[in-house]
Amino acid sequence: MVVPMLFLSLFCLLLFSGTQLLPAATVQLKDSASVSGKILAEKRDQLVVDIGYTTLVIPRSQIVKVLQTDAASVKAPPAAASVAQVEKPVETKSGMFSTSAKPPPERSVRDLVQQLGESVVQVRTPGGLGSGFIINEDGFLITNFHVIEGETQISIEVYHQKNGELERRNYKQVRIIAINKFQDLALLHIEDKDTPKFARVFLGDSELLSVGERVFAIGSPLGLERTVTEGIVSTKTREMQGDLYLQTTAQINPGNSGGPLFNLRGEVIGVTNMKITFGEGLGFAIPIEQVKFFLNHRDAFAYDNDNPSNPFRYLEPPSRVKQQSKK
């Protein structure tokens, strides 16, 4: 049997990196052994074979036969396969938004930001700016009510992935669909012509969160778009002014308002909307369950053009004069 010369692997890779790779092959050795991989180089007294996770230098005296094989039949290196094959979550559509049919695996923040960054947008108005996130391919998005309160001119800045690069695009035809000023939520729709299919997020389940679980936020604090901050869930039930919020150590600053708070599965579990200004690491987010309720009952919160500050529409009370005349 041949003893692999592992200590020469790195040297061989450097030595033959500039040479043209020969076809994949199966090298039959003495004692009925064999090695399959790509031949990096052939010399008079030895053969250099890349088997994926390392490189072997095989003496000619130990080789019985070399069989050329189809390159597609050679297995890819295990490490490369794990990077290339990213399991996509199984989608379950629930009206306007999507959720995962089963919890996707946890991943690093670095990997998730590459995947999710395109779905997080910047919301601009004449009075300021905030953040938001797209919930479906048709350009519907969630932000905070206080980001657009009293405003009618709204623009959305989106970073589209194109040829491996980010392309900034500004959309100015934005309509307010529904608002809930009491829970600080707003539903907007991008209605510009010739818009592409938008990248969107999956909504998670904030009730399944655990205190101490790692989360991260993406937004535009102080106008610094695509800023990522990481932290943990400090508590799931922080009561403030009669409502319950997620408290997190992920840094939240003005401009983060309306942006998503993600778990490490890449699901939105909250909408960041405020912080305690005289402390550090005291940020708060609206639980995603409230967002789902808002979306599922959006007709009740439909924006009224006649009274922009009120999401509800009331019927006029019956006239007493008309009632008396009917008698």
Image: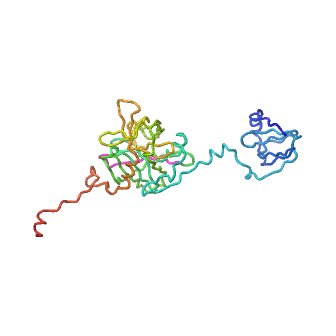
Tell me where residue 98 appears, x and y as whole percent: 46, 54
Tally the marks: 0
Residue at point 55%, 42% (across, down) = 107
Q: Is residue 171 above or below residue 225?
A: below
Closer-to-camera residue (100/310): 100
Q: Which residues are magenta?
A: 149-161
Closer-to-camera residue (80/101): 101
- On screen, residue 12 versus residue 188, left or right, reads right
Residue at point 35%, 56% (across, down) = 297
Q: Residue 133: in sight, yes or no?
A: yes
Tell me where residue 125 appears, x and y as whole percent: 35, 45
Quarter where residue 45 is shown? top right
Task: Decide whether residue 316 is among the magenta residues.
Answer: no
Q: Is residue 198 above or below residue 215?
A: below
Tell me where residue 27 appears, x and y as whole percent: 82, 46
Residue at point 81%, 38% (across, down) = 57
- On screen, residue 200 versus residue 239, left or right, reads right
